[in-house]
Amino acid sequence: MKTIQAEKRSKAEIAMTRFWKRKDVMVVAAGSIPCIRELYILAKEMGTLHQFRYVSLTNSDYILGSAEDIIREALRKAALVSGVQVVVFYLSCLDILVRLDFHNLEEKSYKETGVLVKCFYRGPLGKEEKERLDVDTFMRTFPKETGTIDPSSSQLPPPVSDGAGISDWMRRHGWANVLVTPAGCRSCMSDCDMTEDQKHVYYPTVVTRDFVFGMEDTTKKQTDALLKQTKLSGVSFIGTAVPSFIGMDGESVAESLCEKDYQAVYWEADGFHDALYGVSQAELQQVRCKANWLLKEKKKVVQILGYSPLLAGPMTDLEEGFSFLRQLGYEVIFDGQQAARNVPVLNWVVSTAGIAAARWMQERLQTPSIISRPLGDHAWSTWKKQVQELLRDGKGERKLQIHRMDIPQKYEEHILFIGEPVQIMGVAHALWHEGYAQIRLSSMAWSKESEKLIRSAPGGDSFHILRNMSDLVKERDWADVVYCDPWLFPFFDGKKTVSMPWGLISGRTGLSR
């Protein structure tokens, strides 16, 4: 078992940096989110985003066999970008596992476009392929460098993955998080998608046979060894693309530890969903399981749902609420950090990721909830009043959203917000009460499941969903001022931008701003 920790990327030259030193090479990558996000981050650092294209796929695309046709079309489009001389298809583990017809991809793409298309094997599975070439030999097949790729085109940032999001959220004292993955998937977490203070995150060392016969035994054996070396009370196993694709029985791995008097859980992340959806599903899974053994007598405990550093930002933004609850005599717990023993008297939902769990608890356990990230004196005053009402009544839901239409309009600027729905609603609400009436709320959705979550947020029906650059361009043309993550600033050249970091986009880099 090896450690995953936040660290700066090595300055050692890798294949990607070699490819992007040429001005006429386009790199295309498919696979799960960590596969493409890692390359996006590197391209961003190198200033070569215009030389990178990712293919957005689902787990089902690989299982049902539609991935190859989608990839083939993406390669064709990449080859037709102005200035492209070479297209490198940077293979992921799943591309190799499903045995795409690499020779046909290369030959047919060349015949259709006249541009050289080459498949480059990478990762733990790529190293086992007989046809794998080292980067020097691989690049000798390239034609002489000519031309420069059009610098104006690029894609939206791929989000933090479900697995990384769950790891960021699940921080219970005395527990370890084990990301069940080949080595490649952990790189994205180390480079960007975990905070520097997070400890006890690991991944198993796997070999080729594990992809054929299953990763269960290897994970069990290495976890047993870890528990002998490290004092832990529980282990949180987190799925990724490869174990999901090969049908790993994660429950049996967790149960094997429970039989040895450890606590354990398996989160069924597949790497093709973002952190918003991943944490939402994990919280929902947890409250459903806890409901069977929670003491039904409600204690003076308020549970925070939807919180993780990457999704919801620093806790200091919520401190006024924590202090108020403690002054009333209530204990505040975070569901990813402490285990509730009794049904809480109230759930405070601080991001969209917590809504599904809160509403399940409303229906099944009659636990009231408030969905709100207040900003400003008026919003906090309303929040405190609503909290007291919910605590008194013991049922119901309150939420913060723009609702008063009688506030005088003082300013004409078109203000666009892009970010976490509950958070940006809080900021937009504050500006609305200052007289800004031309406000539009947007959020990025990687999948249909994430879009459904966004729609479930307060005011979610009116949110503008960003799925691709075309959607973003429409919002850009409307806006005068844009509140968004700094990674999106380059897409709004000429507009006034205001920094609103969202870890789903910029990982830990935004948290330090």
Image (cartoon, rainbow, N blue to C red):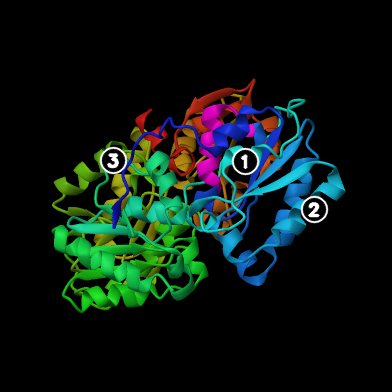
Asked if the residues shown at circle 3 and circle 2 are in contact, with their CB atoms under 8 angstroms apart, the answer is: no
> Could you give the CA–CA distance between mark 1 and mark 2, rounded to whole angstroms?
19 Å
Is 424 above or below relative to 458?
above
User: Do we see residue 492 in this rendering?
Assistant: yes
Residue 83 vs residue 210: left or right?
right
Q: From the viewer's side, name the closer residue of 510 and 143.
A: 143
Q: Amino acid at mark 1?
A: Thr
In primary-sequence order, the first of circles 1 and 2 is 2
Comparing 21 with 387, the one in front is 21
- Circle 3 is placed at which residue position? 315
To which residue does mark 1 refer? 137
Query: Where is mark 2, residue-wise?
Result: 107
Query: Could you classify mark 3 by the number of other residues whose Cα lies within 10 Å: few (under 14), some (14-19), or many (20 or more)?
Result: few
Q: Is residue 46 magenta?
A: yes
Residue range (magenta): 36-49
Instruction: Tell me residue 133's x, y (percent).
Output: 59, 47
Other-residue count near label 1 (Cα within 10 Å), few / some / many at <14 / 14–19 / ≥20:
few
Residue 467 image position (x, y, % from top left) = 64, 48
Element on which disc 2 rests = helix
Mark nearer the viewer, 1 or 3: 1
